[in-house]
Image (cartoon, grey):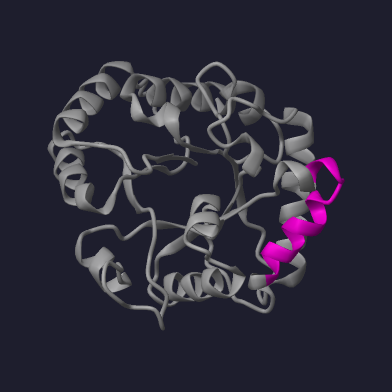
Amino acid sequence: MIIANWKCNGSKAMIDDWFNSYRKTIQNKGFDAGIIGIAPPSIFLNELDLHIKKYDMDIDLCSQDISGSVRRCTGAISSDMLKDNNTFGYCIVGHSERRALYKEDNEIIQDKVFECLSSDINPIICIGESEEENNLGKTEEILKEQLNILRNVSLSDSTTIAYEPIWAIGTGKTPDPKDVNEIHKFIKDVVQSISANSRVPLVLYGGSVSKENAESFLKEEYVDGALIGGASLDGKNFAEIINTMRNIKC
């Protein structure tokens, strides 16, 4: 699974250029690399939907956010709106930027996860530790606390966790891929042990992923894919990362 998180970026012209570059670069070897998705700003969901259909691309639309069941207010996006707009696949929940800037705590994030699951939308739940927490050796403690929102919850087959160490997002800093692999195994074990249906989730890595370093992460046993920020804004770069994923899994 490779998901592009465009964050607060995009325009109609950029989308045109993106698809032109992507189509010229993507390799179609008949191998299924799993879900390929794009999470644009909500205003561009329909524009992307039109391009995906126009070029018959095997790309899923994803939402960057969803309103919880009790917080439907001005500016919010409901599950009904997303499904009506053909974003019937995935939704990013709990990104560190929303935790920090919008003060979304575990209770709010849990509400959003419940809204996704009750609406047949697969959540991509972002978790991660700060640099200070990492330096203090508290990574597993912090991740377990964030994952506790899934205790006794029946998860969908495609419920996904994205491990994004906060200190690596947009900084160019990256952890050692071997360390990431061990953390991903830890995440899988925790979720399997606390979820109501013992689901083992897909776990993506996110945090300064680029076409240059993608292979080092994607070849690890417990890394099921990537959630990509800045590098996904260029269609050629994004396609090259997908090509890397396909070459590893072939």
Residue 201 vs 73, above or below: the answer is: above
Q: Quadrant of the C terminus?
A: top right
Residue lying at the far bottom of the rendered structure: 70
Front in this rendered view, residue 201 or 132 = 132
User: Is residue 62 in the magenta section?
Assistant: no
Residue 152 horizontal/vertical position (percent): 68, 79
Q: Is residue 29 visible?
A: no
Q: Main secondary structure of the magenta part?
A: helix
User: What residue is rendered at 29% in x and 48% in y?
Assistant: 41
Q: Position of residue 159 (x, y in %)?
A: 54, 60
* Left or right, 2 with reference to 180: left
* Image coordinates for residue 141, horizontal then vertical, percent: 81, 58
Answer with left or right where residue 32 lies relative to residue 78: right
Q: Which residues are magenta?
A: 134-148
User: Is residue 155 among what the camera can see?
Assistant: yes
| Residue at point 79%, 43% (across, down) | 134
- Is residue 140 magenta-colored? yes
x and y, in percent, of residue 72 in the image: 33, 78
